């Protein structure tokens, strides 16, 4: 069984709001190799550290979700678990 999709189809998801692990997010980027989507939390943020390890500012939390599993032949369970908002 071969999964057929294009990066253009994934790029069409940019801006789509999804729920990932119970957190409201939106798709902000598509990575090519291996294929993955980057999610940015809508409501949650984290503290970003500078190069010295000092906390400097709050930034939105991001997640990278793989599209395919390790053998690159099936959908990754994390990708399948995304729910549209």
Image (cartoon, rainbow, N blue to C red):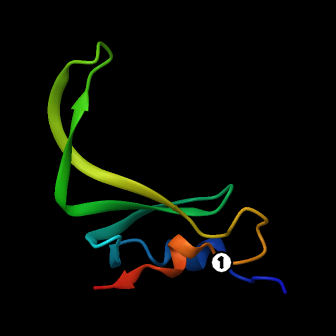
Mark 1: give few (<14), some (14-19) or many (20+) Cα within 10 Å. Answer: some
Query: x, y percentage for residue 33?
Result: 68, 55
Give the residue at mark 1: 75
Relative horizontal placement of residue 75, taking residue 19 as reference (left or right) = right
Residue 54, quarter of the rendered image: top left
Query: x, y percentage for residue 24?
Result: 25, 72
Which residue is found at the position 57% from the left and 62% from the top?
36
Which residue is found at the position 43% from the left and 79% from the top?
82
In the image, is residue 56 above or below residue 42?
above
Which residue is found at the position 28% from the left and 51% from the top?
61
- Quadrant for the C terminus, please: bottom left
Query: x, y percentage for residue 38?
Result: 44, 59
Query: x, y percentage for residue 81?
Result: 47, 79
Relative horizontal placement of residue 79, taking residue 83 as reference (left or right) = right
Residue 8, quarter of the rendered image: bottom right
- Quadrant for the N terminus, please: bottom right
Relative horizontal placement of residue 20, taking residue 2 as reference (left or right) = left
Tell me the element at label 1: loop
Residue 84, quarter of the rendered image: bottom left
In the image, is residue 29 above or below residue 84?
above
């Amino acid at each position: 069984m071969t999964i057929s999709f294009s990066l253009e189809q994934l790029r069409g998801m940019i801006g789509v709001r999804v729920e990932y692990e119970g957190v409201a997010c939106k798709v902000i980027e598509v990575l090519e190799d291996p294929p993955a989507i980057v999610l940015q939390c809508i409501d949650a943020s984290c503290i970003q550290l500078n190069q010295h390890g000092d906390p400097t500012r709050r930034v939105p939390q991001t997640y990278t979700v793989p599209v395919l599993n390790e053998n690159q032949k099936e959908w990754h369970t994390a990708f399948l678990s995304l729910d549209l908002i």
